[in-house]
Image: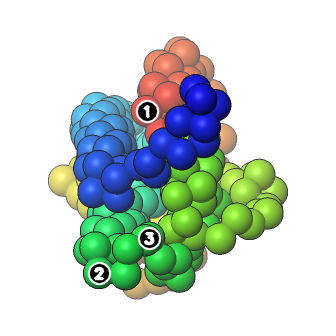
Amino acid sequence: MNKVKSLLKPKPNPSEQLRDWQRRLRQECRNLERQIRDIQKEEKAVHKSIREAAKRNDMGTAKALAKEILMSRKAVNRLHENKAQLNSISMHLGESVALARTVGHLSKSAEVMKLVNNLMKAPEMAATMQEFTKEITKAGVIEEFVNDAVDSALDSEDIEEETEEEVEKVLSEIAGETAAQLPEAVRKERTKVAAQGAGASQDEEAIAEGADDEEELEELRARLAQVRS
């Protein structure tokens, strides 16, 4: 008798499932917001280090930190995109549940499927979305699918090479007031004319003079890498 009751137990209420899903999606959005704040907080500290390096004409350190700033900003952009997609999933799940009240069951959503697949490819979201995907697949919202999330996540981790122009723009933006110490950077930003020979000699001099600052540079890089992960 107990076995029969177990087999005949009612399916989870779609409205209750929706509340639980949306609650978890909101929590994940808050986690992303916290990561964004942490990255931006560390970026402000790096701004100060770039200005200090520029004042002492330490172009090697300034450029290295400018590249870290570029990587951090790209990470923030990815996190904003992830958050937007989580909000879209929540909205489409709400629509699916509203339809279920009419047809009596949850219908599959192509939009949710597409958004979930996109998030599975994001390294910072893959683990969270794997468990969530199992639940909404079981509930009938999306089709069960075999994806290349692991390979895609690894591909997404390839950081595209920051161009010299991008680095110079960051230097000009952050250390513009020290233009006298950054003649090459400012000239390149304004005229787009390369000064590679002068830049190479300045970099070599900066590396020699800035050896004592290597530990500080590595510490800043480590902190930025930690908040981006």
The amino acid type, in three-letter code, at marker 1 is Val
The amino acid type, in three-letter code, at marker 3 is Leu
The amino acid type, in three-letter code, at marker 2 is Thr
Gap between marks 3 and 2 measured at Cα = 10 Å
| Number of numbered callouts drawn | 3
| Relative depth, front residue between 67 and 58 | 67
Could you say whether the residue bearing mark 1 is in a helix, strand or loop?
A: helix
Going from the N terminus, do you reach mark 2 or mark 1 first? 2
Gap between marks 1 and 3 measured at Cα = 38 Å
Residue name at image x 34 percent, y 53 percent: 13
Going from the N terminus, do you reach mark 1 or mark 3 first? 3
Q: Which mark is residue 102?
A: 2
Q: Which residue in the structure is indicated by mark 3?
A: 106
Residue name at image x 53 percent, y 82 percent: 110
Q: Position of residue 116 (x, y in %)?
A: 54, 64
Q: Categorize mark 3 by other alpha carbons within 10 Å: few (<14), some (14-19), many (20+).
A: many
Could you say whether the residue bearing mark 2 is in a helix, strand or loop?
A: helix
For the N terminus, the image quarter is top right
| Relative depth, front residue between 110 and 86 | 110
Quadrant in the rendering for residue 97: bottom left
Q: Which residue in the structure is indicated by mark 1?
A: 227
Gap between marks 2 and 1 measured at Cα = 45 Å
Q: Tell whether 164 sits left or right of 62.
A: right
In this view of the protein, can residue 115 be seen by the observer? no
Q: Is residue 180 above or below residue 147?
A: above
Q: Tell whether 163 sits left or right of 47.
A: right
